Structure formats: structure tokens, C-alpha cells
Amino acid sequence: GSGSGGGGSSGGGGGGGGGSEDDVVVLTESNFDSKVLQSKDVWLVEFYAPWCGHCKNLAPAWAEAATKLKGKVHVAKVDATVEQGLASKYGVSGYPTITVFQGGEKSDYNGGRSASDIVSYALDLYEANAEPPEVKELTSPTVFKEACEGEGMQACVFAFLPHVLDSGVEGRNQYIATLQQLAEKHRRKPLGWVWMAAGEQDAAEADFGVGGFGFPAVVLVKPSKNKYATMKGSFSADGISDYLIATMAGRTKFADVKAMPAVREHAPWDGSAGELVVDEIPLDELFD
């Protein structure tokens, strides 16, 4: 390990604010390239020396930031006295030196040194760098797992869209574009996004009480807690946005469901207008 420099770390580096030294990634010449330079993520890298007093002072805040940023921004450290090649490559002359790597590009760190400063600076970088989640059609249990139960996800937006015969292709694409726009706007929230057409996921419709108010309908689901909240407002970017903000802030009541509904597997929408399935009843019989 990095050595605590004569017992200077409080309680094994947990230090004060509830961070864990385990969440700080230890970087060396052998893993720097594969972990940092080939990553699309944001990395905060501290170059330190074991004997440096300021580095010891920074350690608890660095560990706390690492724990709080888990799943979003990687917080790492390099012992510059051992990894001298890395230190000279990145022009490190004093300790601690904090640098930012993003998509393999190095930039300066201009934030403060407290845990909260480090976290807020890192989250700003993360937000600027974050790929908005993709709004996926719920076509299988795998899609549900990936979109709604991924690392750090707390809730999932279920959008039930009208049958394509009711909305038309353009109407449906507009609904999906609205959802994608919202996913982009709220990308810092731990939200997954899925859509399905009316009648495709009947278990979800039944469990979440959707359909009675017609379509489109939006339900915010918390898979890990088996809870859901149904939106009563209008299906518009503003309407859904206001609803999400209120619901995530705890201003909306959630209802319980015994378990997450079974997801039925089906072919994804092919972008076409669909066909009206007509029962073959001769017209003259209808008007007898």
C-alpha cells in the first residue's frame, strides 16, 4: 500500500468524514494507461509523496470524496516517489498535485481541498461529461435490468405510449424525443428511462394501474423498493420535468407493489405505422 507515513492516518485512512481509503484507486505505471487514458470517464488523480504533510492532510477528504463520487467519478492516487516516470510525464513538481483526466486528456484541477469542494468540482465535470441515458424500448427483462437496475440507479421512468395506430409514427417519435430530451436534462439524477406501447407490457399496466386514464402515461418506479408513483399531469417536457423533481424530492406519495412486474419479451418497434388487425366480418352482417 501507500504507507500511512508514521501512523498519520486516522483509523486506517477512514478519516473524519466517512470516506474509505478503499475507494481511492491506486495507480501505477502498469495500470495508468488501461484505467485512466483508455477510459471515457472523469478521473481525479492525486500525485503525492508519502513524507508530504499536505498530502497527509488531504488524505481523509480525498477518501471521503472517493466514496461519495463512486459510480460517477474515479478518485485515484499515484505515489510519485515510486512512479517517477508518471510524475515526470505529467510535469509534477510539488505535492500534492491534483490533475483531471477526461477521455484520456489531462487538465488542471481548480477546485478546493475539502471533501465537499472536491465532490462539487467533480460532479460539475461529470455532468459536463455524462452521456445522457438512452431512453430504451422495454422489450425484454434484460432491457429492464440494464436501464433500471444499473449501478447507482434509484428510480426508473416508465412511459406508456399510445398504440402507433393512435399516435401515428410522427406522434410516437415526438413522444420518444420528449423523453430523450428529459433524460438529457435530468442526466445527473440516478434515473433510468424506458418506454412501451399500450398493450405490450400488460403486467406493468395492471400492476401500476395504467390505462384507465388513457395513454400516454408516466410512472416513476423504484425497483429496489417495489414502489411506484403515477403522474397525473400532462405528457409534456415541462409537465414530466416538474413531476420528476417533485417526486424525487419526496413531495409525491408512492404506492407499493408486491414485486416488479414480469417483462414480456417482444420484437422492438420497427418504426413503421403498424397494421390494423380487422376481424373478417362481412360488412353487410354488421348492419343487419
Image (cartoon, rainbow, N blue to C red):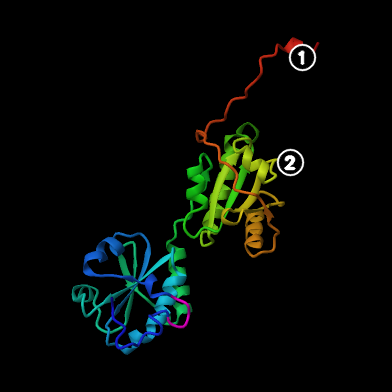
Neighbor class of circle 1 (other Cα within 10 Å; few <14, some 14-19, many 20+) is few
Query: Which quadrant does the N terminus fall into?
Result: bottom left
Q: Which of 165 and 32 lies nearest the eye of the viewer? A: 32
Farthest residue, direction right:
288
Q: Is residue 186 magenta?
A: no
Q: Is residue 212 left or right of residue 262?
A: right
Say which label, 2 or 1, has the lower sequence index.
2
For residue 87, what is the image quadrant?
A: bottom left
Q: Which of 52 and 179 lies nearest the eye of the viewer? A: 52
Q: CA distance from mark 2 to mark 1?
A: 28 Å
* Residue, disc 2: 212
Q: Is residue 17 magenta?
A: yes
* Residue, disc 1: 286
Residue found at x 66% / y 62%:
246
x and y, in percent, of residue 50 in the image: 27, 84
Residue found at x 40% / y 78%:
62
Marker disc for residue 124: none
Q: Bounds of the magenta span?
A: 15-19
x and y, in percent, of residue 105 in the image: 31, 65
Q: Main secondary structure of the magenta part?
A: loop
Farthest residue, direction left:
85
Residue found at x 21% / y 75%:
83
Label 1 sits on a secondary structure element that is helix
In this rendering, the answer to whether 35 lies above or below 22 is above
x and y, in percent, of residue 122 in the image: 43, 71
x and y, in percent, of residue 175 in the image: 59, 44
Disc 2 versus disc 1: nearer the observer: 2
For residue 280, what is the image quadrant?
A: top right
Which amino acid, mark 1? Answer: Leu
